[in-house]
Amino acid sequence: MKTALELPAAASKAVRLQLPFVEPYDWPRVLRFFAGRATLGVETVENGAYKRAIEWLGEPGTLSVIRHTTKPCLVATVGGPAGRHAKLIGKHLTRMFDLQADAPAIAAHLARDPWFAPLTQAAPGLRVPGAWSGFELVVRAIVGQQVSVKAASTIIGRLVQRAGTPLPDHPHPDTAWRFPTPAALATADLDKIGMPGKRVAALQGFAREVATGALPLDDPRADRGELRAALLAMPGIGPWTVEYVAMRALRDADAWPGTDLILMQSLAARDPSMAKAAVLRARAEAWRPYRAYAALHVWNEIADRSGSAKGG
């Protein structure tokens, strides 16, 4: 699938991109996922659009993504100097919004398990939402260890206030901050931020590794297996964090955050034997190579019932 690029008119700096996807595509649930985990001040979801301030190759800009009203594509609008890199940004957004996933094939595979048949029927176009930045996602994953999705969002908002960069004269108040850089987060004063001391140390240790270039998390040329191993070797980062990052940032369709508390509770409620880790692992083998989508279907079902973001 090719990205359609609409060059800006002379009077406008905005560049519009049409990003095609394979139908069906569940845009409302993708937006709900992002909305429930949005970084306060940096990104927001409103009126059917995902919005944030961006930076690409050192050039600032704004981003808005909506679904086209009639065509099977998303429409991304990139404003500011970053618009000069629209084609590269379009490729990045294709990954971020999981546009090339073969939704019918994934749903058919998971529906072989009787548990998943009703879930895939309820949300046949469910996708695995990615992330604008792998660094941002790991920060969120570390902050989100053993706390609710809502609590993690609150703490992330405090991190932005402590170490992020305000954007003067920014046109949208809800996206008027740039997420902290690795170097800024590594040296920020995070006293009384709302996290245990060991987690703060893990967060800033990770930020230092990214800042020095030792962990090229957002380099598309980096080996995914090596990144997984490097993350797992870091203090305070365990298997759940690595798998969560793999499914959303490294785009591993088979990543499996099997130790997620919400996920385990939901599966055990369906079958008490799933409370045993070995039994759950064996059952999940049948969901390969789409275990990331299996996790999303479980989280989505819970969100459908509760009306709020749960898990991840």
Image (cartoon, helix red, strand yellow):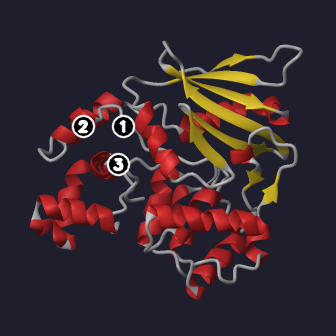
Mark 3 — residue? 307
**Amino acid type, residue under disc 2 in the picture:** Thr
Indicate the position of residue 170 as horizontal and vertical percent values.
82, 42
Q: Is residue 211 visible?
A: no
Indicate the position of residue 185 as horizontal and vertical percent values.
74, 70
- The residue positioned farthest toward the bottom in the image shown: 197
Apparent side of residue 277 relative to residue 206 in the rendered image (left or right): left
Marks 2/1: CA distance?
8 Å
**Amino acid type, residue under disc 1 in the picture:** Leu
Marks 3/1: CA distance?
17 Å
Indicate the position of residue 99 as horizontal and vertical percent values.
49, 31
Indicate the position of residue 47 as horizontal and vertical percent values.
56, 31
Mark 2 — residue? 120
| Other-residue count near label 3 (Cα within 10 Å), few / some / many at <14 / 14–19 / ≥20 | few
> Mark 2 or mark 3, which is nearer the start of the sequence?
2
> Mark 1 or mark 2, which is nearer the start of the sequence?
2
Apparent side of residue 172 relative to residue 277 in the rendered image (left or right): right
> SS for tag 3?
loop
Residue at point 76% right, 53% down?
A: 178
Q: Compared to 107, does 128 lie above or below?
A: below
Mark 1 — residue? 126
Apparent side of residue 165 relative to residue 300 in the rendered image (left or right): right
Hey, which quadrant is residue 211 in on the image? bottom right
Instruction: Say whether marks 2 and 1 touch (CB < 8 Å).
Output: yes
* Nearer to us: label 3 or label 2: 3
